[in-house]
Image (cartoon, coloured by chain):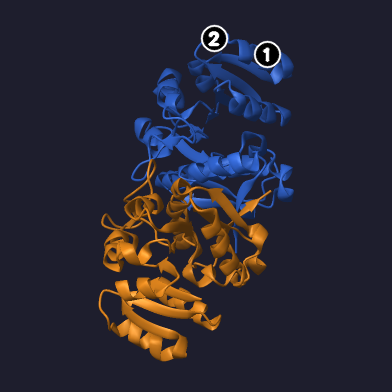
Chain colours: A blue, B orange
Amino acid sequence: MKIGVLGTGMVGNTIATALVTKQHEVRMGSRSAVNDKASQWVSENGENASQGTFADAAQFGEIIFNCTKGEHSIEALMLAGEKNLEGKILVDVSNPLDFSKGMPPTLFLVNDTSLGETIQAAFPGAKVVKTLNTLNCLLMLNPGKVANGDHNLFICGNDDEAKKTVKNLLVDFNWKPDNIIDLGDITNSRGTEQLLPIWIRLYGLLGTGDFNFKIAK
Amino acid sequence: MKIGVLGTGMVGNTIATALVTKQHEVRMGSRSAVNDKASQWVSENGENASQGTFADAAQFGEIIFNCTKGEHSIEALMLAGEKNLEGKILVDVSNPLDFSKGMPPTLFLVNDTSLGETIQAAFPGAKVVKTLNTLNCLLMLNPGKVANGDHNLFICGNDDEAKKTVKNLLVDFNWKPDNIIDLGDITNSRGTEQLLPIWIRLYGLLGTGDFNFKIAK
């Protein structure tokens, strides 16, 4: 599958690399057509790896991953271009973290709104699927790294077919289908994004990102 | 131990009942000295169960449990009386849930504040320990009801000795010490109270409150 990954940071790099290992063709997008971090990533990941602007990556992908920082996501998606997102699945991995007042961060969209639904409202033609935002990027496509993969991933979005496609992609990375919890429509991003305040505190306490939420029943 | 339980609803009733079964002397407090629900509870729970006003219950207890609804908590604690809380452990089980705009509720204190720290600020002489607010009341003092008790409870507060006392009380109800995660000071209530938005969505999805968060490592 052709996939666009927006963002060249650790999250974008980790996801893009994992996708290439599964033979997907991945174009990493950034503000400029040639980016140092993207160039490094391309050089390390063979012929299925390419780079371009946000718009190039969005146009290239059948599925687009938003791996930009939450504070820049709307701007990056504007640069990606509404027409390049039209009708496509937009996997939103970002969180509305506000570090401007120091650690731990607060959320700049919270409570009666969320970043996931704000993105959906700004790009009504995209099929936004919010997932992967509640765990460290090293676990996102490698759930077996902790507890034998016996923990949960949340997913939400307005388009059932889009969620199904993303679930299949996740299962290909060893997420057990029963461990992927579909919360419903995109407003449920409010629930998953508000996991960040305790996630960050646990990260500080445990001194590692190698943990995830599991719903014990 | 003498314990005051503020609130006669399902949370207060369940906690008060569990405490009586462990031979604690429990006084349930409400707005009035005699309350129908408290009277019923007293009649069912033997000589260690009594009732009174919020102030009676707070004066009686060495430890006070705030089991009132979040929206009424500050008022109930004002009625309990600052002097009756002075120097005592105040276990805050409440959440700042706002149902006024329908389901699912939002939080009326959130992000850069929380109900736990608001209560601590309003009653600086009390030793507020926030815990038990992230799971169904039927599991609070009966963790073995799901997953053999193999899930987590969060605790936070400014007074280490107070947290230790509360932890010991919880261990007496079969919480495994390693499963009680001390997040630090009372501002960490922001983390645990923001678990409610996803907890409520999971409650709707699963159709039961018989679940809890576990941190898979």
The mark found on residue A33 in the picture is: 2
Protein chain holding label 1:
A
> Reading the chain from its start, which is encountered first: label 2 or label 1?
2
Label 1 amino acid? Gln
Q: Position of residue A31 (x, y in %)?
A: 49, 13
Numbered circles on residues, count: 2
The circle on residue A40 is 1
Mark 2 neighbour class, 10 Å CA radius: few under 14, some 14 to 19, many 20 or more: some
Give the left or right position of residue B171, taking residue A160 as reference.
right
Residue B62 location, quadrant: bottom left
Q: Amino acid at mark 2?
A: Ala
Residue at position x 42%, y 71% in the image:
B11
Q: Nearer the viewer, residue B83 or A78?
A: B83
Could you say which is closer to the camera, residue A83 or residue B77? B77
SS type, badge 2: loop
Report the residue at 47% width, 74% height from top. Answer: B15
Q: Is residue A40 above or below residue B52?
A: above
In this picture, residue A152 sits left or right of residue A43: left
**Which mark, residue B10?**
none
Q: Please, which chain is the residue tagged with disc 2 on?
A: A
Q: Is B9 positioned to the left or the right of A48 in the image?
A: left
Q: Secondary structure at mark 1?
A: helix
